[in-house]
Image (tube, rainbow, N blue to C red):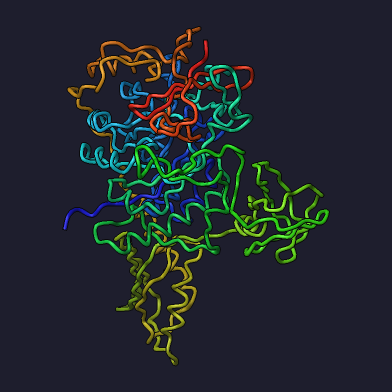
């Protein structure tokens, strides 16, 4: 049998509390921002908080990855070097980075992971990044299973793939529209989310083809049904998007994917979890109950989807939630439905009328299929009902919902006036505590086995759960002695593991590796002199400045968005189809700005540019 592959469930964390909840609910690793340069300006964390998460995660061999994945300016290099050294001292397992300038900084030997902003879409680029020192590669979300396989054949380091959460419409790292329009760079963690705006789609004459729709706002990714195929294609780390999401979202989504992955791993001899400890939670995870705009598997199974699947959530960028049924009638604030699920007082609902009109309301009272809304509103018969806030479910998630423990086996022995307790946990750590008794133990008048086992099993304030126990049931042992032994051996096990935990180290850079291209565009995001030196040392002859540092650069003719998603295909106007409804040039209009929709049919891609 070949080498057993470790499978990692990687969860997002806005803050330390959410990171700890993610680990409790089954995450093998978490990724979180530091005090700066973390690609989510509103999700920074102090070094003290990161250290606290590290201490909790490492109990279970779970890992903590810190995002330092924004572009770095020249006057920030020294500060980033200090930050990375502090993160290393805090115990972080790896950095997720975009800017190649970090590979020329004075850094400790911490592992580096190539961020999704590195836009890894080809075997050549993936192989290059492995050769220059990256230990894990976060692949572009747009890749198909066949493209992932090709990258797997060209590399040996673990490949990380997104499985759930919000989708950027542009290739990650190559979206400049927020910077161009609002001077808020997505590559600096300040994205204005222009893709969630409403747009009009116009033809060459200015005629509106589609009015006031969220044409670039994609549905959320959900690949839970494709995990086996992703594993077989080469993905080892399964990443959930959502560093701005709340604790309830993270709890539910992590628990949901934990169940799926555990089921797959249990049925295969070639896979194992990358962390230890079993999570038990007090709720049944239901993925549709957490924030979602409807789901898509995106391009995973086909390079050019031909099955008519809608990828955009054109009616609204807000959460759709779970489908409940349809409106069968109304009478003022009373709404009759054909729903089979149960509604709750306080639920939030979204109604989608047959003409696509969207409205929302809160449930004041629920009577089976009948609802009394808080406000009277006109609703069309046949309107679809989605619940985007399940009051009962969210209330349950707001409580303490999970416990994660390591199995431990104990053996209690007595000989020659000495009482010892040996504990061995599932990590393979073994600790032994011995007590010299002032007086010999006396034979017990009654059987003590059950009483001693119950006392040793009281591990509630530790990370352990008693799996098996051998005790000295023949002797009477005071509970105070047993409880002290239990506390001491549990503490000894934890301290032992801390001393044995080994972090990975940064891979050595192959200085002879050649970058796959000799010319870099501004979309390749070279923002400091160290990045320029890095690329030059690997064969790049010319590199344009990133637009963030290029000053008042004329952006006319440049792609502000570069996407695999295509509006023509989405709206039935694909030029490769015989029944294409319109073959002329298309334009998007929003906020008094006009954009050219340029399609590359050979590559099956789209670019959004400023109109002249």
User: What is the tally of numbered marks visible in this picture?
Assistant: 0
In this rendering, is residue 547 above or below 218?
Answer: above
Give coordinates of residue 366: x percent, y percent: 74, 62
| Residue in the foreground of this view, choosing between 555 and 309 | 309
Q: Is residue 449 visible?
A: yes
In this rendering, is residue 199 above or below 411?
Answer: above
Displayed quadrant of residue 144 = top left
Q: Is residue 80 visible?
A: no
Give coordinates of residue 133: x percent, y percent: 26, 31
In this rendering, is residue 549 above or below 99?
Answer: above
| Residue in the foreground of this view, choosing between 64 and 230 | 230
Residue extending furthest front? 579
The residue depicted at 63 percent of the width and 17 percent of the height is 592
Displayed quadrant of residue 143 = top left
In this rendering, is residue 560 above or below 439?
Answer: above
User: Dividing the image into 4 quarters, which one contains the N terminus?
Assistant: bottom left
| Residue in the foreground of this view, choosing between 393 and 52 | 393
Give coordinates of residue 273: x percent, y percent: 33, 55
Give coordinates of residue 347: x percent, y percent: 69, 55
The residue depicted at 46 percent of the width and 52 percent of the height is 23
The residue depicted at 59 percent of the width and 50 percent of the height is 321
Residue extending furthest bottom? 445
The residue depicted at 43 percent of the width and 20 percent of the height is 72
């Amino acid at each position: 049998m070949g080498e057993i592959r470790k499978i990692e469930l990687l969860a997002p964390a806005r803050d330390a509390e959410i990171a700890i909840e993610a680990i409790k609910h089954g995450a093998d690793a978490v990724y979180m921002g530091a005090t700066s340069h973390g690609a989510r300006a509103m999700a920074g964390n102090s070094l003290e908080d990161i250290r606290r998460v590290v201490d909790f995660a490492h109990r279970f061999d779970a890992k903590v990855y810190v995002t330092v994945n924004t572009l770095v300016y020249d006057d920030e290099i020294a500060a980033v070097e200090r930050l990375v050294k502090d993160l290393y001292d805090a115990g972080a397992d790896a950095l997720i980075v975009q800017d190649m300038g970090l590979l020329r900084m004075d850094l400790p030997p911490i592992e580096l992971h190539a961020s999704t902003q590195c836009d890894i879409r080809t075997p050549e680029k993936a192989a290059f990044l492995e050769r220059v020192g990256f230990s894990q590669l976060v692949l572009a979300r747009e890749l198909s299973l066949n493209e992932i396989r090709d990258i797997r054949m060209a590399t040996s380091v673990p490949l990380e793939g997104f499985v759930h959460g919000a989708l950027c419409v542009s290739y990650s790292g190559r979206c400049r529209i927020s910077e161009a329009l609002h001077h808020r760079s997505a590559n600096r963690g300040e994205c204005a989310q222009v893709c969630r705006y409403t747009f009009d789609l116009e033809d060459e004459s200015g005629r509106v083809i589609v009015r006031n729709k969220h044409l670039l706002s994609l549905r959320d990714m959900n690949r839970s049904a494709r995990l086996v195929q992703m594993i077989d294609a080469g993905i080892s780390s399964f990443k959930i998007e959502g560093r701005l999401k709340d604790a309830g979202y993270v709890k539910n989504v992590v628990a949901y994917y934990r169940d799926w992955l555990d089921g797959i791993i249990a049925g295969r001899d070639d896979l194992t979890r990358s962390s230890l400890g079993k999570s038990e939670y007090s709720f049944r995870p239901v993925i549709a109950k957490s924030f979602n705009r409807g789901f898509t598997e995106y391009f995973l199974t086909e390079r050019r989807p031909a099955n008519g699947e809608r990828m955009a959530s054109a009616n609204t960028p807000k959460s759709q939630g779970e489908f409940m049924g349809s409106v069968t009638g109304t009478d003022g604030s009373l709404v009759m439905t054909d729903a089979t699920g149960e509604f709750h007082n306080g639920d939030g609902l979204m109604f989608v009328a047959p003409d696509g009109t969207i409205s929302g309301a809160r449930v004041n009272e629920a009577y089976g299929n009948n609802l009394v809304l808080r406000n009277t509103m006109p609703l069309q018969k046949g309107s679809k009902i989605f619940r985007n806030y399940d009051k009962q479910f969210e209330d349950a998630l707001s409580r303490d919902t999970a416990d994660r423990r390591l199995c431990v086996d104990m053996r209690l022995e007595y000989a020659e006036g000495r009482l010892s307790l040996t504990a061995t946990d599932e990590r393979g750590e073994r600790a032994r505590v011995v007590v010299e008794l002032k007086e010999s133990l006396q034979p017990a008048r009654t059987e003590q086995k059950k009483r001693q086992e119950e006392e040793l099993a009281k591990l509630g304030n530790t990370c352990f759960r008693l799996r098996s126990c051998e005790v000295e049931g023949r002797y009477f042992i005071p509970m105070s002695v047993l409880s002290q032994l239990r506390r001491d051996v549990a503490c000894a096990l934890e301290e032992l593991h801390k001393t044995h935990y080994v972090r990975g180290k940064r891979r050595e850079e192959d200085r002879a590796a050649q970058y796959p291209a000799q010319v870099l565009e501004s979309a390749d995001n070279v923002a400091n002199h160290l990045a320029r030196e890095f690329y030059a040392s690997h064969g790049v002859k010319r590199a344009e400045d990133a637009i963030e540092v290029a000053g008042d650069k004329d952006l006319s003719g440049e792609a502000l968005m570069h996407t695999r998603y295509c509006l023509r295909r989405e709206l039935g106007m694909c030029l490769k189809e015989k029944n294409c409804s319109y073959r002329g040039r298309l334009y998007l209009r929003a906020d008094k700005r006009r954009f050219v929709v340029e399609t590359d049919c050979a590559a099956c891609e789209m670019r959004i540019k400023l109109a002249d």
